[in-house]
Image (cartoon, grey):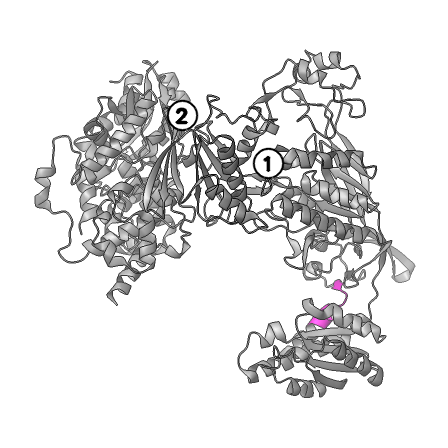
C-alpha cells in the first residue's frame, strides 16, 4: 500500500510518465556519473514504473545524480529520468529526520575557496 | 411516392446478438411508403442478394434500405444487386447498424432502438433519392511517373511493358535514385549497381519510355484520365540530344572543388559532371553555382573540348506541356539532417558518418574506390560502432520521427557483416534498441552477422560520442549487462531516420492528394488500396508512401503499375455521379466554394441570364467539373447562399435524415 | 540602455571578479547594470519537483522587480541564470505553479513570466553585438587558445534555456573570437563538472572535472573560461591540472583594457 503511495508521489511531483520509455537506455549511455550509481537512470524509470520505490529510496544512488540533465536532453521519448531521481530523493528527505546533509557537518567540508553556491545547492538538494 | 423495401441483416451474430433484427424490420415496416420488409442472416450472400432482387421485382420497389454493415464494406455490393434487378443503384441506402450500433453497444434494448432510428433516417433519405447517372470521360493513354529511383523505374517499365507510353520526370541529372548509391543489397548481398543499371538501360532503350531528367513537375491540372501537366526542364547547359557522354569536358573542367552530391560530399567533382559512370541519360550537366563561365563569363574550356558541340551556356529552363491519364508519385526518401543529434558528433567529426555515407565509403565507385578508409585521415578503421534508430521511434515532442524507419536494422546488419568479411581485424559493435527483421530470410541474415561474422550486438544506446586524440570515444549503455561502455572507435556510423523527399509536400498540393503528418502520401485504404491515393488517377510507388526496403518497393512499384494499366486500358471512365452542382439562380459569385475545393473542380464563368422585361444580365456563377469533383461536400458547407448541393447527399436529404433521427 | 542585474550571492564573496568585471565591461559597452534592490538568493539549484513553490519565490521576486521597471533581467552566474530562467518558464507555462506562486505573493499584479531573462553573454551578443565588442577590443587576446566551458547549467534543458544548441553550442566560441583569441572546440564542454557533490564526495567532481580539462587540453586549450563560480572551483580544485580557469568577464575586461 505504502509502495503505491510512494509511486503516486513520485509520478505526481516529477510529472514524468515512465510508460513513455521504450527501454533504449540512451539515458544511461549519456549519464556522466553512471559508474557511481547503484541504480542507473534507465533503472529508475523501470523501477518507478514497477513500484519498486523503496529500493531506490534506500540506495545511495539518489545522492549521486548530478541533475546535469544530460539524460533529459538526450531521451528520444522525453521521459526525463532526472526528474524521477529528484522525486525519489524528495520522498526520502521529506520524511521526518531524513535530511541527508546536516548543518554541523558543514565546517569540516569547507575550504577557503569553496563558493557558498555549493553549500546552498547541496542544502537545497539534500535537505528539507 | 416511393415504394420502399427494408432489408435487415443479421451479419451472423455480429448484429443479431445485440440488435433485435426482427423487431427492427417490423418496426421499420410501419414507416410510410415501406411496402416490404425482411430480415436475413447474411444479406450480402448470394441467397440474401436474391431475396432483394425478388422483392424488387415482386413488390415493384422504387427504393431500398439495407440495414447492415458500414457502406464502406458493402454499399457497392448492394448497388450492383439493385442494378441487376433493374433499379438505379443510387436508389439504395445503407443504414450502418453494425459499426455504428451493434459493435459499440452491449444492451439489446438500446441497440435495437438505435438501429430503428438509423433505419428510419435511411428511409427518410430514400424518399428524396433520385436516380443518378454517372458521366463518362475519355482516358489519355499515357502515364507520368514522378521520380526515377527504383520505384519509378519499375513502375515505368511495367506500364511500358503493357504497351502504354510513360514519361519519367527525375529532378536529378540521372535516374537511379538512392539504389544507385548503395553498394550491396540485403539479404542476398548482390551488388546494387549490377541489378539496377540493367534496369536503367532498359528504361533508356524502351521506346515507350521517355525520361525528363533534371526536370520537375511545375503544375498539374485536370482529373483522372485527363491530367494536364507542365514539366520544367531545368537548364543543364548541355544539349542532351548532342552530348555523347564521352566525359572529355568533365576531365578538362578547371573547377574541381565542387562537392560531389552523389558521394554525399565525401569528395569533389568538376563543375561540369556526369554523376556516375552508368548514368542514364549519360549526359553532362553544368552546376551553375560553380561554373566560372556562367558566373563570370571567363573560361569556356568545356565548350572548346566538346567535339559534339553540345555545350550551350545560354540554355534556359524550358516548360513542356503533356497530357496523362494517370500519375504515379515515386518521390522517394532522404536520410534526415543530423543537425539536432550533435551528441553523436556528426558535425564535429568527419569520422562520424551516416549509413548512406558508409555505403559510398564501401562502394567500388565511391570516393575511396571501395576500400574502407575513414574520412579524416584515410586510415583503415579498426573499431567501428554502428548506432541504430538515430531520429527514429521518438516521442514526437522532440526533433525526430515517431515511426520506425524500417530499413536500418537490415542495412546495418549488412554493413556489419560485410565489414567483418572484408576486414576480419575490425571489431564491429552495433547498438540496438530492438532488432527488427520481419522479411523473407531477414532474421537469418541478422543471425549470420552475429554467429558467423562475430558482430557485437549490444542492446543499448549510445549517449555521447566524443572526438578525442584522433579517436571517437563512444559512451553507451549495455542494458543486458547493466554496464556503461566506453569504446574507443575509429568510425561511428549513424543509422539516420529516413523521411520523404522535400519535393513531396508541394507536389501533394499540386496533385490535391493527402499526406500524413510526416509528409508520407496517404494511401486510399491502408490494407485494401495500398498503391492508390484517395485522389482518382494518382498512384503511389515506393518510399513516398512509407519507409520500404528494395524488395518491398519493387513489389509496390509493380502493384502500382498494375493499377495504372487497369486505368489506361479503359477507353472511357465512369464518373462518380454524387458530385456537387450549383444552382446558378441562387449563386452569388462569392468564390467561397472555389476556395475550399481541395480538387480544383470549381471554376467561375460569366453567364447570361434572362431578366424581367426581356433584359439580359451577365452574372458570375460557379461551375463544377463533374469529372474532377470527388463529392466531398466541402463546397456545400461553404456556400453562404445555399446554391451548392451534392447529388445523392443533398441538403434536403440530410435534413430529412436529421429530422427522422430527432423525431 | 539599462537592464536589471541579478548578481547572486557567490558574486558578492568568492566570485567577486565575475561581478566586478561584468559591471566594468557593461559600462564600457554602454549598458547600465541596475542591481535589483534586496534580491534574494536563488537557491543555487532549480527546484525540479512540480510541487515546490516556496523555493521558487526568490526568483519570481527578482523577475517581478525587473518587470515593474520594464527591464530585461540579466544574470552572469550560470547557476542563477539556470534557476531564474527555468522558474520564469514555469511561470509562463505551468498554470498550477503560476497560480500558487501568485496567490502566495498576493501582489496587485500577478507575475506571468513576462520578463525577458538574458545571460550576460546573451546580453553581449544581442544587446551589444559581438561585432561591436570586436571593435572595442584594445588588447586582443591574439594567439591565445581558449576553451569555453559551458557545463550543464547554461545549456540544459535545451528547450527551456533556449540558450544555444545544447550538444554543440557556439556562443562562447563566437565571444572568444570577438576578443581576438582562438576558440578551442572540445567535446566535454557541455559535460557536468560534478557540481555541489564536491561537498560530501569530492572524488566525483574530481573525475568529472579531470575529464573536462583533459578534453580541453587534448584539443590544445591554454586557458579555460566559464561563467559559473562552482564550475571554476571544481575545475581549479578538482581538475588535476595547472591550466588557468578564468571567468568570461575577466577575459572580456582584459581584451577591453579594463583589467
CB-based contact (under 8 Å), mark 1 and mark 2: no
- Marks 1 and 2 share the same chain: no
State which region is magenta: B644-654
Q: Name the residue under label 1.
A: B184
Where does residue B311 sit, x and y in percent of width and height? Answer: 76, 18
Q: Quadrant of the N terminus of chain B?
A: bottom right
Relative side of B545 to B625, left or right: left
Assign the C terminus of chain B to one quadrant of the image.
bottom right
For label 2, the crowd category at 10 Å Cα-Cα, with few meaning under 14, some 14 to 19 and many 20 or more, is: some
Q: Can residue B389 be seen in this view?
A: no
Residue at (80% x, 57% y) in the render: B626
Q: x, y percentage for residue B180?
A: 64, 34
Residue B45, position in %: x, y?
Answer: 73, 76
Report which residue position mark 2 lands on.
Answer: C129
Chain letter for the residue marked with disc 2 in the picture: C
Residue at far front of view = B452
- Can residue B221 be seen here? The reply is yes
What distance separates the C-alpha of mark 1 from that of mark 2? 52 Å
Does the segment drawn in magenta span residue B645?
yes
- Residue B526 lies in what quarter of the image? bottom right
Check disc 2 and report its element: helix, strand or loop: loop
Of residues B446 and B50, the one nearer the viewer is: B446
* Depth check, front residue: B96 or B390: B390
* Residue pictured at 57% horizontal, 24% vertical: B367
Tell whether A127 sits left or right of B544: left
Q: Nearer the viewer, mark 1 or mark 2?
A: 1
**Residue B490 — which label?**
none
Asked if the stretch drawn in magenta spans residue A55, the answer is no
Quarter-of-image position of residue C139: top left
Amino acid at each position: 500500500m505504502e509502495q503505491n503511495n510512494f509511486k503516486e508521489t513520485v509520478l505526481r511531483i516529477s510529472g514524468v510518465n515512465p510508460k513513455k520509455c521504450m527501454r533504449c537506455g540512451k539515458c544511461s549511455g549519456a549519464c556522466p556519473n553512471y559508474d557511481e550509481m547503484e541504480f542507473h537512470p534507465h533503472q529508475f524509470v523501470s523501477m518507478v514504473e514497477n513500484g519498486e520505490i523503496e529500493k531506490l529510496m534506500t540506495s545511495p544512488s539518489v545522492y549521486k545524480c548530478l541533475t546535469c540533465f544530460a539524460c533529459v536532453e538526450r531521451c528520444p521519448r522525453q521521459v526525463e529520468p532526472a526528474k524521477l531521481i529528484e522525486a525519489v530523493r524528495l520522498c526520502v528527505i521529506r520524511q521526518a529526520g531524513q535530511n541527508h546533509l546536516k548543518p554541523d557537518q558543514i565546517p569540516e567540508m569547507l575550504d577557503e575557496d569553496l563558493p557558498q553556491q555549493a553549500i546552498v545547492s547541496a542544502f537545497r538538494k539534500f535537505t528539507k | 411516392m416511393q415504394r420502399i423495401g427494408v432489408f435487415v441483416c443479421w451479419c451472423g451474430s455480429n448484429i443479431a446478438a445485440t440488435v433485435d433484427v426482427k423487431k427492427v424490420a417490423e418496426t421499420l415496416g410501419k414507416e410510410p411508403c415501406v411496402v416490404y420488409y425482411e430480415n436475413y442472416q447474411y444479406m450480402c450472400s448470394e441467397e440474401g442478394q436474391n431475396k432483394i432482387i425478388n422483392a424488387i421485382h415482386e413488390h415493384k420497389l422504387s427504393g431500398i434500405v439495407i440495414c447492415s454493415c458500414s457502406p464502406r464494406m458493402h454499399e457497392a455490393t448492394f448497388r450492383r444487386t439493385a442494378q441487376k434487378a433493374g433499379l438505379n443503384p443510387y436508389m439504395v441506402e445503407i443504414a450502418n447498424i453494425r459499426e455504428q450500433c451493434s459493435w459499440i453497444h452491449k444492451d439489446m434494448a438500446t441497440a435495437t432502438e438505435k438501429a430503428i432510428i438509423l433505419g428510419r433516417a435511411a428511409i427518410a433519405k430514400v424518399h428524396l433519392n433520385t436516380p443518378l447517372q454517372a458521366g463518362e470521360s475519355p482516358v489519355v493513354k499515357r502515364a507520368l511517373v514522378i521520380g526515377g529511383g527504383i520505384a519509378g523505374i519499375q513502375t515505368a517499365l511495367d506500364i511500358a511493358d503493357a504497351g502504354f507510353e510513360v514519361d519519367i520526370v527525375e529532378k536529378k541529372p540521372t535516374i537511379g535514385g538512392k539504389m544507385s548509391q548503395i553498394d550491396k543489397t540485403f539479404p542476398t548481398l548482390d551488388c546494387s549497381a549490377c541489378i539496377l543499371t540493367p534496369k536503367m538501360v532498359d528504361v533508356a532503350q524502351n521506346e515507350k519510355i521517355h525520361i525528363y531528367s533534371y526536370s520537375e513537375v511545375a503544375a498539374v491540372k485536370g482529373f483522372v484520365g485527363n491530367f494536364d501537366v507542365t514539366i520544367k526542364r531545368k537548364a543543364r547547359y548541355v544539349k542532351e540530344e548532342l552530348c555523347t557522354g564521352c566525359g572529355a569536358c568533365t576531365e578538362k573542367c578547371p573547377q574541381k572543388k565542387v562537392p560531389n552530391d552523389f558521394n554525399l560530399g565525401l569528395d569533389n567533382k568538376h563543375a561540369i559532371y556526369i554523376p556516375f559512370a552508368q548514368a542514364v541519360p549519360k549526359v553532362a550537366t553544368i552546376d551553375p553555382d560553380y561554373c566560372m563561365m556562367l558566373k563570370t563569363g571567363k573560361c569556356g574550356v568545356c565548350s572548346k573540348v566538346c567535339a559534339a558541340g553540345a555545350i550551350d551556356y545560354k540554355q534556359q529552363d524550358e516548360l513542356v506541356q503533356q497530357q496523362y491519364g494517370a500519375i504515379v508519385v515515386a518521390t522517394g526518401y532522404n536520410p534526415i539532417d543530423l543537425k539536432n543529434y550533435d551528441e553523436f558528433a556528426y558535425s564535429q567529426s568527419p569520422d562520424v558518418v551516416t549509413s548512406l555515407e558508409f555505403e559510398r565509403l564501401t562502394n567500388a565507385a565511391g570516393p575511396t574506390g571501395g576500400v574502407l578508409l575513414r574520412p579524416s585521415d584515410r586510415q583503415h578503421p579498426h573499431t567501428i560502432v554502428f548506432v541504430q534508430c538515430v531520429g527514429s521511434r521518438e516521442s514526437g515532442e522532440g526533433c525526430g520521427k515517431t515511426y520506425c524507419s524500417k530499413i536500418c536494422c537490415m542495412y546495418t546488419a549488412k554493413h556489419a557483416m560485410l565489414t567483418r568479411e572484408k576486414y576480419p581485424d575490425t571489431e564491429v559493435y552495433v547498438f540496438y534498441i530492438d532488432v527488427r527483421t520481419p522479411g523473407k530470410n531477414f532474421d537469418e541474415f541478422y543471425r549470420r552477422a552475429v554467429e558467423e561474422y562475430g558482430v557485437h550486438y549490444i542492446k543499448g544506446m549510445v549517449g555521447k560520442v566524443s572526438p578525442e586524440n584522433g579517436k571517437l570515444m563512444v559512451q553507451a549503455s549495455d542494458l543486458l549487462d547493466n554496464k556503461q561502455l566506453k569504446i574507443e572507435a575509429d568510425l561511428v556510423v549513424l543509422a539516420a531516420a529516413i523521411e520523404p523527399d522535400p519535393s513531396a509536400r508541394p507536389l501533394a498540393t499540386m496533385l490535391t492528394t493527402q499526406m500524413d503528418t510526416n509528409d508520407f502520401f496517404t494511401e486510399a485504404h491502408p490494407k485494401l488500396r495500398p498503391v492508390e491515393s484517395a485522389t482518382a488517377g494518382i498512384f503511389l510507388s515506393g518510399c513516398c508512401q512509407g519507409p520500404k526496403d528494395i524488395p518491398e518497393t519493387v513489389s509496390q512499384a509493380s502493384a502500382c503499375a498494375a493499377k495504372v494499366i487497369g486505368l489506361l486500358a479503359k477507353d472511357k471512365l465512369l464518373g462518380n455521379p454524387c458530385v456537387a452542382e450549383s444552382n446558378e439562380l441562387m449563386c452569388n459569385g462569392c468564390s467561397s466554394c472555389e476556395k475550399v475545393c481541395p480538387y480544383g473542380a470549381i471554376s467561375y464563368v460569366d453567364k447570361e441570364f434572362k431578366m424581367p422585361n426581356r433584359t439580359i444580365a451577365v452574372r458570375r456563377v460557379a461551375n463544377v467539373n463533374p469529372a474532377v469533383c470527388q463529392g466531398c461536400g466541402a463546397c456545400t458547407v461553404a456556400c453562404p447562399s445555399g446554391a451548392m448541393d451534392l447529388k445523392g447527399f443533398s441538403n434536403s436529404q440530410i435534413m430529412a435524415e436529421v429530422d427522422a433521427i430527432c423525431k | 540602455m539599462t537592464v536589471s542585474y541579478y548578481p547572486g550571492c557567490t558574486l558578492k564573496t568568492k566570485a567577486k571578479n565575475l561581478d566586478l568585471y561584468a559591471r566594468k565591461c557593461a559600462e564600457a559597452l554602454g549598458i547600465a547594470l541596475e542591481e535589483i534592490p534586496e534580491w534574494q538568493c536563488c537557491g543555487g539549484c532549480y527546484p525540479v519537483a512540480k510541487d515546490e513553490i516556496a523555493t521558487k519565490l526568490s526568483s519570481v521576486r527578482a523577475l517581478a522587480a525587473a518587470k515593474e521597471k520594464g527591464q530585461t533581467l540579466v544574470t552572469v552566474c550560470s547557476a542563477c541564470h539556470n534557476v531564474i530562467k527555468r522558474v520564469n518558464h514555469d511561470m509562463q507555462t505551468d498554470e498550477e505553479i503560476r497560480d500558487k506562486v501568485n496567490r502566495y505573493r498576493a501582489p496587485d499584479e500577478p507575475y506571468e513570466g513576462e520578463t525577458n531573462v538574458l545571460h550576460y553573454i546573451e546580453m553581449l551578443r544581442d544587446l551589444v553585438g559581438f561585432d561591436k565588442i570586436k571593435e572595442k577590443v584594445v588588447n586582443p587576446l591574439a594567439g591565445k587558445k581558449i576553451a569555453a566551458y559551458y557545463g550543464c547549467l547554461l545549456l540544459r534543458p535545451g528547450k527551456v534555456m533556449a540558450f544555444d544548441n545544447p550538444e554543440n553550442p557556439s556562443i562562447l566560441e563566437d565571444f572568444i573570437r570577438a576578443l581576438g583569441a582562438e576558440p578551442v572546440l572540445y567535446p566535454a564542454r557541455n559535460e557536468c563538472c560534478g557540481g555541489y557533490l564536491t561537498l560530501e564526495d569530492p572524488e566525483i567532481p574530481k573525475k568529472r572535472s579531470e575529464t573536462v580539462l583533459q578534453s580541453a587540453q587534448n584539443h590544445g586549450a591554454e586557458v579555460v573560461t566559464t561563467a559559473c563560480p562552482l564550475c571554476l572551483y571544481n575545475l581549479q580544485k578538482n581538475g588535476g591540472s595547472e591550466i588557468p580557469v578564468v571567468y568570461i568577464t575577466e577575459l572580456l575586461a582584459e581584451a577591453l583594457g579594463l583589467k
